Image (spheres, rainbow, N blue to C red):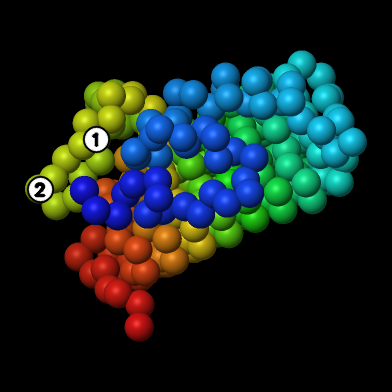
Amino acid sequence: MKGIKVAELFSLNNSLVSPLFEGAEYPFEVLPKIGEFIKKLGETLDTDIYEQIGEQIWIAKSAKVAASASITGPCIIGENAEVRHCAFIRGNAFIGNDCVVGNSTELKNVVLIGKVQVPHYNYVGDSVLGYGSHMGAGSITSNVKSDKTLVTVKLGDEKIETGLKKFGAILGDFVEVGCGSVLNPGTIIGKNSNIYPLSSVRGFVPEGSIYKNANEVVKKR
């Protein structure tokens, strides 16, 4: 299935998290591995740059973390990242350099590769967000199907079985998600694409697209 492989979605150059994706063809393959990866990586981090705060929580000394934020490990928060008031980080969270985790935003089992913004009332679970991606206020990933069956990735008549009960969304580099949107389980959005506000997105959105609704997805000019 063209457009949903790791190499087609992300630029992982010089990212601490790039080893997580080694050997993975599709990005959702890394979701069950995030926690153990963070634990091992945390032990190797440069202590001039990072310090360990609590059990399996490593925070860059240059990061800004609000006193009201709740952080459960395993978790890494990268250089110059900002974690704002009442953010709720529930574990298995890699927050890359220059990311923003906003007020009352909740994260669980996620990778924010770098310069990602989830700044206002977002829920992101069992997901990977590419470099420079942004989720508008109130936009969320839905990570469990209502019938609790395993999540599949769909592109027209094509279907990939993921074997995962919990899988939210994959955002390629520089994806923009409009305010109030819901990314349904198994959604993959190709890099440099835009999602209109208040959208309910399901399946695959190709690279360089504008998603207006399920029946109107156009290529950027």
Percent x, y of residue 50: 83, 34
- Looking at the image, which residue is at 61% across and 32% down? 93
Q: Residue at x 63, y 26 (%)?
A: 38
Position of residue 19 in the picture relative to residue 94 (left or right): left
**Left or right relative to 30: residue 204:** left
Determine which of the numbered discs, if any, sits on residue 157 in the image: 2
Residue in view at x 64 percent, y 40 percent? 16
Helix or strand or loop: what does disc 2 sit on? Answer: loop
Residue 59 occupies which quadrant of the picture? top right
Q: Amino acid at mark 1?
A: Thr
Q: Amino acid at mark 2?
A: Asp
Q: Position of residue 44 (x, y in %)?
A: 74, 25
Mark 2 and mark 1 lie on one chain; the one further toward the N terminus is: 1
**Quarter the C terminus occupies:** bottom left
Residue drawn at (56%, 31%) of the image? 108
What's the distance in space between the residues labelled 2 and 1, CA to CA?
12 Å
Query: Which residue, given by chain and number where applicable, does mark 1 sit on?
Result: 152
Q: Position of residue 51 (x, y in %)?
A: 85, 30
Please say if 187 is above or below 135: above
* Count of numbered circles on the image: 2
| Disc 1 secondary structure class | strand
Badge 1 local density, few (<14 within 10 Å), some, or many (20+)?
Answer: many
